[in-house]
Amino acid sequence: MNNRTESGASSGRAAMRGRPWLALAVWAAITLWGGRLQAGAAHASLQALVTQNLLWGVVLAAAFMAVVAWRSGWWPLLGFQAPRPARSLWLLWLPGLYVMAMFGLSLAQGLPAAPVLLLVLANTLMVGFSEELAFRGVAWGAVRRVLPFWAGFFLVGLLFGSVHVFNGLITGEWADATNQALNAFMSGALFLALRIRLRSIVPVMVLHGLWDCALFLIGTLAAAEAGPTPLGKQVLSGLALVGPLFVYALLLVRSERVRAGWRDDRMP
């Protein structure tokens, strides 16, 4: 790390004494408020919103957080650099296989029309950027200053999961939103573990966006062929799908040598 980078990281740590939690609260309010307005007087499913509209609330929330992070001097701690070392990208193999399998399933069953496909891709990539910036960027940069590793690791996961409960404000389906929160907690652990191991947030943003894109494409096909999935089946399906990735996340950070550099992204 050169002197300029070290100076930037030091100023970033000092700036993190500011108000990242207030920024996160405003980010969440913009995201949810935008979704609620787009849903209209009646509630709407997330599937309908993602496939029928540009999620401008997500765009505004991402822009807000990016500007705040830049102006507040948090940027050096958020992980916007190439993975270090580059060969660590091989750690993406398991979630990468999941994503390829899900896209393969979507392709085998028939993709939606090109405009819908492009809209889903644009929305989910923006969600990936926005949520990673907020949680594995700003939130992680804040908690790693003041908490031990595991406390910070699980706190960020719980925050990420709990935000998804409020999707019930958009959909009106609070039980489904709670199940989404459980899945988000587990997938969020994977995204954070990869953020730690790669020393970079960029590939995690891309993975997150592609993961969501594949899920929504499968959901579009399922919605066209059948009615709503019973909640019990949703929970079991989520555990079967995301559970192994949660275990993989814990394995990625099981080593004390890996955790030794977690506070400032030093190579362990």
Image (cartoon, helix red, strand yellow):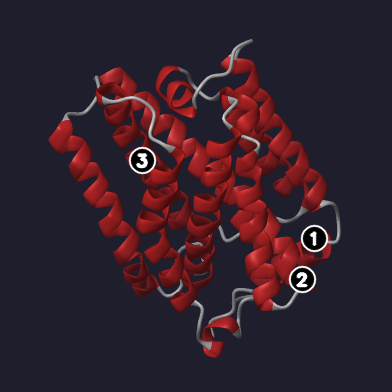
Labels in figure, total: 3
- Label placed on residue 212: none
Q: List x then y, in percent, for residue 83.
A: 45, 67
Q: List x then y, in percent, for residue 49.
A: 48, 22
Instruction: Locate residue 21 relative to residue 213 in the image: left or right.
Output: right
Residue visible at 29% across and 30% down in the picture: 222
Which of disc 2 and disc 1 is earlier in sequence?
1
> Looking at the picture, which amino acid does disc 2 mark?
Arg
Label 1 sits on residue: 16
Q: CA distance from mark 3 to mark 1?
A: 34 Å
Name the one closer to the observer, 263 or 191. Answer: 191
Q: CA distance from mark 1 to mark 2?
A: 8 Å
Which of disc 2 and disc 3 is earlier in sequence?
2
- Label placed on residue 215: 3
Quarter of the image where one finds residue 29: top right
Q: Are marks 1 and 2 in contact (CB under 8 Å)?
A: yes
Name the one closer to the observer, 181 or 208. Answer: 181
Which of disc 1 and disc 3 is earlier in sequence?
1
Q: CA distance from mark 3 to mark 2?
A: 34 Å
> Looking at the picture, which amino acid does disc 3 mark?
Leu
Label 2 sits on residue: 145
Question: Which quadrant holds the C terminus?
Answer: bottom right
Residue neighbourhood size for the residue with mark 3, other residues' Cα within 10 Å, grouped as few (<14), some (14–19), many (≥20) = some
Q: Going by the picture, which residue comes out furthest to the left?
A: 108
Residue visible at 42% across and 62% down in the picture: 243
Q: List x then y, in percent, for residue 202.
A: 48, 55
Q: List x then y, in percent, for residue 267.
A: 53, 81
